[in-house]
Image (spheres, coloured by chain):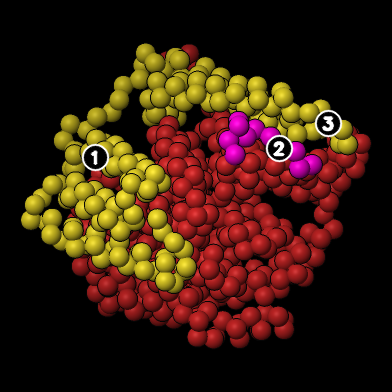
């Protein structure tokens, strides 16, 4: 407990607290604006953190993560335009509530739910992370390889679009990481004669290109879209004891669902909200009310999407495996700061591991305060002129990427990946597996080759080592299950056509 | 559920991915044979290239039957008219801006102000009334960015 208290004490210093506050506030603002995502904000902030102490940098990014996911409910509730994909489920009941003149109530429920989800998942994060990190220290190359495999396959099969497209995105991400030095033996490969490729493609240009640049050019297509005017007051935002009692079970269940989904590698807040919403609906006595402005729907979605952040941080700090796309970027941030994500983080850099845990707790409290007292003003952010916003973001992408490597090669690479991201979006190929494939590719390759070296080429540990076998089995099931479901659906469709 | 994506796009992308996989596979043939471990440097690129090609063929196989049946859903009365050309023009202008900086034709300050003013003007529907605001915004953003990066972060912008 002592390291946790030490990091909490550090957070209460002027500079880290300011950064956390700024991070949460920025996250909320950006999360509120449809089209701008938390991923984009964190990616664009990465170059700035290069000049900060590692703990401060992570504190800022965690603040943005918490703020971004929570802030996205504002546009989802008021305009039926989710600020980020995490709040898609909030639109189902939040928007109808808003239409019934209960905007403040919907926002109050959503903000409180986000806070409760965050605090419950923080408890899981604080309690589970240290022992899990100890367990992960016993893992060998086969466990790590199968864990990465599991992350990629699960993300590909559960993300938006088809499994095949998800797998292609993951393969493409891994291939993009190939040029440069072979991580196992130091052999140069696939540089195609370009000197700049000898050090491989950096994380920043690829990330900013794929997430930010592609999104901007997509948003410019609909730049004339103007959200309808909505007014929000403060009355009725705070919940009373009766409200807490009424939604108590939903709060707890959704927090647990969200945390659990977050822990599973590669699955983000949107899936957590979806599953939690389904669970709330199926256990409700009035399921027909869901989708018509039912309070339980807002509570389930918002509790789970915030809880998933804490859950997703567990594999990140204990094993160096991202629980979501944003976590993959946080791993990138740790790498940029010369830190090695994984179980050794608790031993070599406890201030970072516990710093993440503490920042997540305090970030949630700050988020609750800012959103409860400033949501009236935050709602006005929805009407910021897009032309100025887009111009500023494009400029910041160019300078940000240039600043990290002091190289225009990286800026050109960013533009290329902007096009790649845009095309992937047009054919509904998910970006999540692409980024996670890019980040995890060297781990997967190094661990597989170390494992094969140790066993002289035998793959038997995939079946004989308990953890590796479990992860491998989950990977196989995750891969085959969607194919089986598709086959079953097609068969049923053919049968019904034959009967007709 | 049938995909809403135009099958022509899917086929074009898949062909591109297959070509990319062939290039990766071809260049990885030059990599030396493994000496101290069973896999070697070429295994991952070759493996990924094969998997990606196969998956791309599956996409093509699934997309071909939809070529005849696919009909693009077009909203006859859209609330907002999409402006794809504007996006393309701004992308090209961004490439020009980066090129100007990379080849040292102009330094960051003038290039940034001109670039932001032009794209701001285009994005505000070429409204001349808004132009002074756009130029003011461009000057403030460029000058602020320049001083933040050079004075605070000690990064010399071109």
Chain red in the figure, letter: A
The image shows residue A389, relative to residue A251, as above or below, that is above
- Residue B71, percent across and down? 31, 21
From where the camera sits, is residue A306 visible? no
Q: Which residue is mark 2?
A: A188
Q: Which residue is mark 1?
A: B86
Query: Which of the numbered marks, if any, corresponds to residue B34?
Result: 3
* Crowding near the residue tagged with mark 3, few <14, some 14–19, many ≥20 C-alpha atoms within 10 Å: few
Q: What is the CA distance from the residue labelled 2 to the residue labelled 3?
A: 14 Å
Is residue A193 located in the magenta-colored stretch of the structure? yes
Q: What is the CA distance from the residue labelled 3 to the residue labelled 1?
A: 51 Å
Residues shaded magenta: A185-195
Chain yellow in the figure, letter: B
Quarter location, residue A333: bottom right
- Residue sitting nearer the eye, A49 or A475: A49
Disc number lying in front (2 or 3): 2
């Amino acid at each position: 407990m002592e390291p946790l208290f030490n990091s909490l004490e550090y957070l209460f210093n002027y500079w880290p607290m300011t950064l956390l506050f700024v991070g949460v506030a920025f996250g909320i603002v950006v999360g509120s604006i449809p089209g701008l995502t938390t991923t984009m904000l964190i990616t664009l902030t990465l170059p700035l953190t290069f000049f900060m102490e590692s703990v401060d940098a992570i504190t800022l990014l965690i603040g943005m993560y918490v703020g971004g996911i929570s802030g996205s409910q504002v546009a989802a509730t008021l305009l039926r335009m989710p600020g980020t994909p995490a709040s898609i489920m909030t639109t189902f009941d939040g928007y109808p509530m808003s239409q019934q003149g209960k905007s403040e109530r919907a926002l109050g429920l959503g903000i409180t739910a986000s806070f409760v989800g965050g605090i419950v998942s923080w408890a899981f994060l604080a309690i589970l992370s240290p022992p899990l990190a100890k367990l992960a220290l016993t893992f060998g190359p086969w466990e790590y390889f199968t864990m990465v495999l599991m992350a990629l396959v699960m993300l590909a099969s559960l993300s938006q679009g088809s499994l095949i497209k998800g797998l292609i995105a993951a393969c493409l991400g891994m291939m993009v990481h190939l040029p440069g030095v072979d991580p196992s033996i130091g052999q140069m490969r696939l540089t195609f004669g370009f000197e700049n490729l000898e050090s491989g493609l950096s994380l920043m240009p690829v990330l900013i290109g794929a997430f930010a640049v592609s999104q901007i050019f997509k948003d410019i297509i609909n730049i004339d879209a103007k959200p309808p005017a909505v007014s929000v007051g403060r009355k009725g935002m705070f919940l009373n004891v009766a409200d807490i009692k009424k939604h108590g079970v939903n709060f707890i269940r959704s927090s647990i669902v969200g945390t659990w989904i977050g822990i599973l590698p590669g699955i983000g807040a949107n899936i957590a909200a979806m599953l939690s919403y389904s669970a709330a609906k199926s256990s409700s006595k009035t399921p027909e009310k869901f989708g018509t402005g039912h309070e339980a729907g807002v509570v389930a979605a918002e509790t789970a999407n915030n809880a998933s952040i804490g859950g997703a941080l567990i594999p990140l700090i204990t094993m160096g495996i991202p629980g979501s796309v944003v976590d993959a970027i946080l791993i990138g941030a740790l790498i940029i700061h010369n830190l090695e994500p994984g179980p050794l983080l608790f031993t070599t850099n406890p201030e970072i591991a516990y710093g993440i845990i503490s920042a997540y707790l305090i970030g949630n409290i700050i988020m609750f305060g800012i959103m409860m007292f400033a949501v009236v003003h935050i709602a006005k952010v929805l009407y910021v002129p897009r032309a100025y916003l887009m111009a500023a973001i494009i400029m910041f992408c160019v300078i940000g990427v240039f600043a990290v490597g002091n190289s225009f090669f990286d800026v050109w690479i960013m533009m290329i990946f902007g096009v790649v991201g845009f095309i992937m979006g047009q054919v509904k190929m998910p970006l999540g597996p692409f980024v996670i494939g890019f980040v995890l590719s060297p781990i997967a390759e190094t661990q597989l080759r170390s494992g094969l070296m140790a066993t002289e080429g035998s793959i038997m540990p995939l079946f004989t080592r308990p953890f590796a076998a479990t992860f491998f089995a989950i990977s196989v099931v995750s891969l085959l299950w969607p194919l089986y479901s598709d086959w079953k659906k097609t068969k049923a469709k053919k049968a019904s056509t034959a009967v007709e | 559920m049938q995909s809403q994506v135009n099958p022509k796009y899917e086929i074009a992308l898949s062909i591109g991915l297959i070509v990319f996989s062939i290039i990766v596979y071809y260049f990885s043939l030059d990599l030396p044979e493994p000496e101290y471990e069973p896999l070697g440097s070429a295994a991952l690129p070759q493996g990924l290239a094969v998997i990606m090609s196969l998956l791309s063929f599956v996409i093509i196989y699934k997309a071909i039957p939809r070529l005849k049946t696919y009909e693009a859903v077009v909203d006859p009365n859209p609330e907002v008219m999409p402006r794809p050309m504007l996006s393309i023009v701004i992308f090209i202008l961004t490439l020009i801006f980066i090129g100007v900086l990379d080849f040292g034709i102009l330094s960051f300050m003038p290039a940034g102000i001109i670039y932001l003013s032009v794209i701001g003007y285009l994005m505000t529907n070429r409204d001349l009334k808004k132009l002074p605001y756009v130029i003011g915004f461009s000057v403030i953003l460029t000058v602020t960015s320049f001083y933040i990066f050079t004075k605070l972060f000690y990064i010399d912008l071109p």
